[in-house]
Image (cartoon, rainbow, N blue to C red):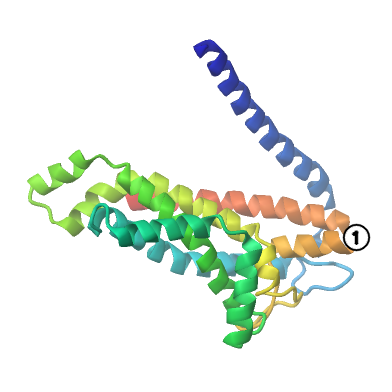
Amino acid sequence: MSKFLKILIKVAAYFTLATLVFIILYISVNGLPNLKPSLFALKYTTENVSMLPSLIVTLVVVVLTLLVAVPIGVASAIYLSEYSKKGSKIVKIIRLGTESLAGIPSIIYGLFGMIFFVYELQMQYSIMACVLTAIIMVLPIIIRTSEEAILAVPDSFRKASFGLGAGKLSTIFKVVLPPAMNGILAGIILSIGRIVGETAAFIYTLGTATAMPKALNESGRTLALHMYVLSDEGFHVEASFATAFVLLVVVVIINMLSTKLSRKVMK
């Protein structure tokens, strides 16, 4: 029985790896030949269907979202795991709420962002409305993954730190967080992937304007939205494959930078 399970686990792992490789190769084969200098023009036109404005908007949305969501999410996780009372009803409600929010379809976030930020607060379709919606969308992921990573740190680390005379705050930042950083980073990377690949939530809050936005209160489109619009129109399918390839490269680069940054923080 154990040999059968071992074989089954290996088959599942290799199948997952093969699927990932197939997707990457398929996007690369169809996207690389269609990459042209005109796709990186500063101004979008119906002839060049430039993705550069969308690329810049994507990076702006990711950076602004993480600047707000990561500190709030990690701080919330520290409170839930280190400061809250064990078995508290409030903590249970918060955890239930974060787990429920993490499973809500993204289009629900988009409808909420459109009704509340776009119409009620009169932000219109803009980067700011998109960022606020994205913060609400990724916060549950960051909170849950960070909390689980902190709770996985053995209590012996904390007791040893307290025994040496360290305070609560010093123990958290110098003893607990470093070994939990990999788990926290995993949540951040998942959040980046969700932000970069999101379309349903952003089409209701960011819009699909093709021009380069000059302020946070202006509309634009991310790379995922750009790819969706191009493929939906059916006139620039080759450009949509090229956009998909660039989107894949952008995700890999952002993940690599996040990993390097976390290692520096751990040191």
Q: Quadrant of residue 92?
A: bottom left
- Disc 1 element: loop
Above or below residue 220? Residue 76 is above
Q: Where is residue 134 in the image (x, y as percent from the top left)?
A: 56, 67
Looking at this view, name the residue that lies furthest to the front.
89
Looking at this view, name the residue that lies furthest to the right.
235
Q: Which amino acid type is shown beneath numbered disc 1?
A: Gly
Q: Please report the residue visible at 11 percent of the width from the left and 48 percent of the height from the top.
A: 162
Looking at this view, name the residue that lies furthest to the bottom.
122
Q: Please report the residue visible at 58 percent of the width from the left and 68 percent of the height from the top.
A: 61
The foreground one among 121 and 248 is 121
For disc 1, the neighbor class at 10 Å (few under 14, some 14 to 19, many from 20) is: few
The foreground one among 192 and 114 is 114
The foreground one among 262 and 219 is 219
31 relative to 119 in the view: left or right: right
Q: Quadrant of residue 21?
A: top right
Residue, disc 1: 234
The foreground one among 209 and 32 is 209
Q: How many marks?
A: 1
Q: Please report the residue visible at 43 percent of the width from the left and 56 percent of the height from the top.
A: 96
